[in-house]
Amino acid sequence: MCYSAGMAYRSLADLFLSQAEAHRDRLLYRFWRDGQWRDQSWAEAAAEVEEIALGLVAAGVKKGDRVALYAANRVEWCLLDWANICIGALTVPLYTSSTPAQIHHIVEHSEAVVLVVDSHEALQRLMAQAPAMTSVKTVVALDAPSAGGAPPASGTDAHVLSLEALKEAGRDHGRGHPGIFRELAAAREPADDLTIIYTSGTTGEPKGVVTTHEHYLFIIASSLAAIPVSEDDVALQFLPLAHSFGRLEHFVVVAKGYTCAFARSIETLSADLQAIRPTMLFSVPRVYENAHRRIHNRVESSSALKQRLFRWAVSVGKRYNDAARRGDPISPWLRCRYRLADALVLSKVRQGMGGRLRLAISGGAPLSDPIADFFQGLGVWIVEGYGLTETSTVTHANRIDRYRVGTVGLPMDGVECRIADDGEILIRGANIMKGYLKDAAATAEAIDAEGWFHTGDVGQIEDGGFLRITDRKKDLIVTSGGKNIAPQMIENHLRQEPLISQAMVWGDRTSHLVALVTLDAEEARRWAEKEGLGWESLEAVVADSRLVAHIRQRIRERNRDLAAFEAVRDFRILPVDFSTDTGELTPSLKLKRRIVMERYADLLDEMVK
């Protein structure tokens, strides 16, 4: 059961409708439409959810049917998800960055009967590049014109209609069946299947993770017990809703009853922060790293005096906020210095993030200690956590009053954790998935007879119960000298260099480690102009011997902080960055090592010969 405001909920349908009734006229969602920000109250959202839900019922969708959502983050995504939840249909999220072949595989494997797309044009592009999706009976195009519906899409026999046409069908169905929506929602049970989320596939073919209402009711309650949020908070949603972390954020918004605004895109994030002025963010480390880099770029272009002032202010802020978090006495002298630092520097930097940001949640990949320390100095707490799709998103989180930098925190309430003999992290609790869709063998391999889920991650439990992640079990490098090396730790270390955007360390069964690195284009331009090289393109700078020598020197300096067997002895700079579009990164920005190793096998072999 999920408990909020003293109430227990049987299902997420019960959660949504109860909260909508309690908050009716308060603001739930903000979204950009027709050149301006628009607001939607709880009552308005609930009415639209009912129309969509009954439209799906009118289209033949039944309990247990799958509805695939292939659309960018937008308010309609959340409304469709709640509609599915209320009638017992299972949402199957699809990343917009996925290839047509990947979309086809997931839709067919899940046997989705409805496919939701942003527009009819997006559907046509998808169908032109992918085989027919035989399971799909209805396609809903969110932006298609409502008059007469949309024309049939080539490559599918499914009926194609607009969202407005779907809602109109729902209104008609509701008039003919009074009270049916509430009956369907009330029929949801804790053990009912809720969703099928496909893993992002860093190590192979994505698997469909089946979770239930009670899995997410449990983890929502645990999350709200761990993070200090209130009904007055405002969040800016920009994590992909197709990712389990973004999905949990969408659930927590409703469970706690605060306001969620949808960023227009990652490119408009800076402007959206100014417009929405959020008090909290959910994100992956890469977003915080980019913000840190942009702030430092501006500082480095200022005078020497301003640079010294900035460093002093962040240092004072770190000491002050760290003491405040621990509840330690703060001397009048430190308090006075902090007020000055905040007035001169820190408040101005926070203003660039909207001015109200106080809390940021980080997950999906390790967050480097310097980034966490920097934001703490600004007065923005980045609370790092850990979890997997198979564990209903989260298993561990730091708390404001129980926090250790470099760890992913303590287990969530009701979650157990232990370390296997080979270092693998094992998790047990009411948040462990029901299983992988149509894959009993993989389910049995992942969850042992005692109920422990084998995460595939390697880590250690430190004093006090804090969990430190060191690497993926399958990513561990074993050198020819028998040393076990965690590449993610070294990669994060290299990425602290401003010029380095991404790094992949390799050296399995070889005598030394090597790396493939990519450059941050903005930093590369700054460096080239500073060195008097001019700027033609990133590819041209990458080939310049002076840049190669500079990166070599920086990596050598980074090696001083590593054990001798962890040092990177050689490297190659790639002319393009890793990305989701080219398949080297998952949608949550994790490195697909197998893809990178296959693509650059010649370069890797060249460095170890």
Image: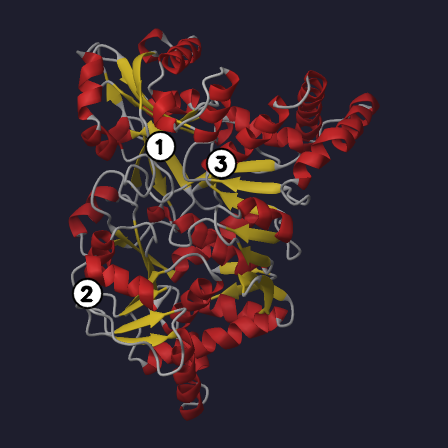
- Residue 288 location (% of width, % of height): 52, 35
Label 3: which residue? Answer: 410
Mark 2 closeness class: few <14, some 14–19, many ≥20 residues within 10 Å: many
Image quadrant assignment for residue 326:
top right
Image quadrant assignment for residue 581:
top left
Which disc number belongs to residue 374?
Answer: none
- Residue 518 location (% of width, % of height): 36, 26
Q: Nearer the viewer, residue 493 or 64?
A: 493
Label 2: which residue? Answer: 133
Q: Is residue 444 above or below residue 348?
A: below
Q: Quadrant of the C terminus?
A: top left
Real-space CA distance between mark 1 and mark 2, rounded to the nearest whole angstrom = 33 Å
Q: Nearer the viewer, residue 228 or 528?
A: 528
Which disc number belongs to residue 577?
Answer: 1
**Amino acid beneath label 1:** Asp
Q: Nearer the viewer, residue 234 or 386?
A: 234
Q: How many marks?
A: 3
Give the residue displayed 28% in from the left and 40% down from the top: 582
Q: How is the image coloured?
A: secondary structure
Q: Is residue 319 left or right of residue 201?
A: right
**Amino acid beneath label 2:** Met
Give the residue displayed 41% in from the left and 20% down from the top: 494
Secondary structure beneath label 3: strand
Q: Going from the N terminus, do you reach mark 1 or mark 3 first?
A: 3
Real-space CA distance between mark 3 and mark 2, rounded to the nearest whole angstrom = 44 Å
Mark 3 closeness class: few <14, some 14–19, many ≥20 residues within 10 Å: many
Q: Is residue 379 above or below residue 81?
A: above
**Amino acid beneath label 3:** Leu
Instruction: Tell us which disc is closer to us: 3 or 2.
Output: 2
Secondary structure beneath label 2: loop
